[in-house]
Image (spheres, helix red, strand yellow):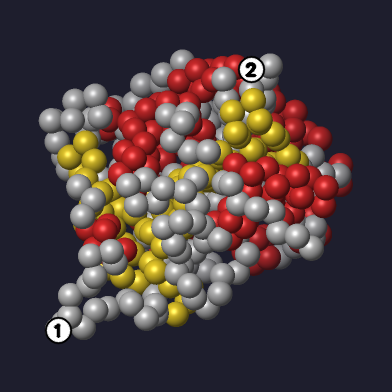
């Protein structure tokens, strides 16, 4: 098994995907090069209007370092002091990690809400809206992830409204420097957080581009996902996935579990949180169709192992497709906050699997409680997501939602309503969880891009 480089992240109503898929992939950026102004000679002082000087002058902001950046940009790693509890600011603070790509103070600025940590984001990474608008970009590490974790850690202060207030304060602080239009964007969990920010602070930005964001308004009802998975793709592909599930949980269960356990031991990894290698096998087998379709490309169905496949072929395909290393304690611990959010407000999917009933050993294993240490209390708040949904349908404006045709995320999508204004939903033909504006049909792509440029007050290029 190939060793996983990044802690895997739960993508809301599904199993796990690599962090590189947590947000839509942008087109390749130009090679990173050091900006001429990356370092000032020790004998000289930066000008008062130098961007580094201006950033350092923002109350609560620390400039940690300047990074190599794409041509025409400067890149900075920043920390911004935030209240742990925005309702009671005097009760402690933490430093929230930011990555800034500075283009020009007269260009638009993109607020990139990733929903996770920033540890593996390259300093020169530019989202699709940033590239389209030739904009500045501020990427935000979500509270309770990475270095942006309060100590001591009061988990009750990790909720969507506190995070939205984090984003609001960042926008307000940096608007002192970047006075042109602001656009927010995010994918999957980051896309959800982008909507939540707009719900509580609707006028912070001129528009939002939201990729592959699920809208789980009733955590007790997962029938929409079950129906989607019963129809997506071809009957032959769905039957092949079912055959693999039964192979993993039946005939070859003992062998696959043993191999997984031996691999984990060889890496020094454990399964204390989930309980055992056998529990990991059952959980990943249950969620296999969801994760498969989130990542599937045009040839994915052809690569599903047949019942005649060797054990090596089955094991390699299963551990790669389900990203099994992410279920070890080593990779679960850094993303505990994701599972906490899913289990307290965002909701998750518990797939119906009657076709596997005779092979299952662990009732309720798809619950988010499975992933979170028992020392952390969890209580689900069922009113949070319906409130967001009502706002989008009755009051949401300048919103652009993008989904992939084959992505299970769109089983429960955000929908516009009679009260929505200048809000749009686009579907990428044949697309998966990484669908971008560039992958829309040509007419939709032109409309969506024109809408984004209009929001940002950037002229549409002429042919």
Q: How many marks?
A: 2
Furthest-right residue in view?
A: 235
State whether residue 57 appears in this view. Answer: yes
Image location (x, y in percent) of residue 155: 27, 32
Helix, strand, or loop for circle 1? loop
Going 68% across and 43% down the picture, which residue do you hit? Answer: 451
User: Is residue 6 left or right of 172 when viewed as pictured?
Assistant: right
Distance, label 1 to label 2, CA atoms, is 59 Å
For label 2, the residue is 419
For disc 1, the marked residue is: 43
Is the residue 394 above or below the residue 203 in the image? above
Going 39% across and 77% down the picture, which residue do you hit? 35
Q: Position of residue 304 (x, y in %)?
A: 75, 57
Q: Nearer the viewer, residue 361 or 97?
A: 97
The picture places residue 1, in percent across and down from the top left corner, at: 53, 67
How packed is label 2: few (under 14 Cα within 10 Å), some, or many (20 or more)? some
Q: Which mark is residue 234?
A: none
**Nearest to the observer: residue 137 or residue 265:** 137
Tell me if mark 1 has few (under 14), some (14-19) or many (20+) residues whose alpha carbon lies within 10 angstroms of its own.
few
Instruction: Say whether residue 138 is left or right of residue 403.
Output: left
Secondary element at tag 2: loop
Q: Residue drawn at (64%, 23%), measured in percent from left and top?
A: 420
Q: Earlier in the sequence, mark 1 or mark 2?
A: 1
Q: Quadrant of residue 360?
A: top right
């Amino acid at each position: 098994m190939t060793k996983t480089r990044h802690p895997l992240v739960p993508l809301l109503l599904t199993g796990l995907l690599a962090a590189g898929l947590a947000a839509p992939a942008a087109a390749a950026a130009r090679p990173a090069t050091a900006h001429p102004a990356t370092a000032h000679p020790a004998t000289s002082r930066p000008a008062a209007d130098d961007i580094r000087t201006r950033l350092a002058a923002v109350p609560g902001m620390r400039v940690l370092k300047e990074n190599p950046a794409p041509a025409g940009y400067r890149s900075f790693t920043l920390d911004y002091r935030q209240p742990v509890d925005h309702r009671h600011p005097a009760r402690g603070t933490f430093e929230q990690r930011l990555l800034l790509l500075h283009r020009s103070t007269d260009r638009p600025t993109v607020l990139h809400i990733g929903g996770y940590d920033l540890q593996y984001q390259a300093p020169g990474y530019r989202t699709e809206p940033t590239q389209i608008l030739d904009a500045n970009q501020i990427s935000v590490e979500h509270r309770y992830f990475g270095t942006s974790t309060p100590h001591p850690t009061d988990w009750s202060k990790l909720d969507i409204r506190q995070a939205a207030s984090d984003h609001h304060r960042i926008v307000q602080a940096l608007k002192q420097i970047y006075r042109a239009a602001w656009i927010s964007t995010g994918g999957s969990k980051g896309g959800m957080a982008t909507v939540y920010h707009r719900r509580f602070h609707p006028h912070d930005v001129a528009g939002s581009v939201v990729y592959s964001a699920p809208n789980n308004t009733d955590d007790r009802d997962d029938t929409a996902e079950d129906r989607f998975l019963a129809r997506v793709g071809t009957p032959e592909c769905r039957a092949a996935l079912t055959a693999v599930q039964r192979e993993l949980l039946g005939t070859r269960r003992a062998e696959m579990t043993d191999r997984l356990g031996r691999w984990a031991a060889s890496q020094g990894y454990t399964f204390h949180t989930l309980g055992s290698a056998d529990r990991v096998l059952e959980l990943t087998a249950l969620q296999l169709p969801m994760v498969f379709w989130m990542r599937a490309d045009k040839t994915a169905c052809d690569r599903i192992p047949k019942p005649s496949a060797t054990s090596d072929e089955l094991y390699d395909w299963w551990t790669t497709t389900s990203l099994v290393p992410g279920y070890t304690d080593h990779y679960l611990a850094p993303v505990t906050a994701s599972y906490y959010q899913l289990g307290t407000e965002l909701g998750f999917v518990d797939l119906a699997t009657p076709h596997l009933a005779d092979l299952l050993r662990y009732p309720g294993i798809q619950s988010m409680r499975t992933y979170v240490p028992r020392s952390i209390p969890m209580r689900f708040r069922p009113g949070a997501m319906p409130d967001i949904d009502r706002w989008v349908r009755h009051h949401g404006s300048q919103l652009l939602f993008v989904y992939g045709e084959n992505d299970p995320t769109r089983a429960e999508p955000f929908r516009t309503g009679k009260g929505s204004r200048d809000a749009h939903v686009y579907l990428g033909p044949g697309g998966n969880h990484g669908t971008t504006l560039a992958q829309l049909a040509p007419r939709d792509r032109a409309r969506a891009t024109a809408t984004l440029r209009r929001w940002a007050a950037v002229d549409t290029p002429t042919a």
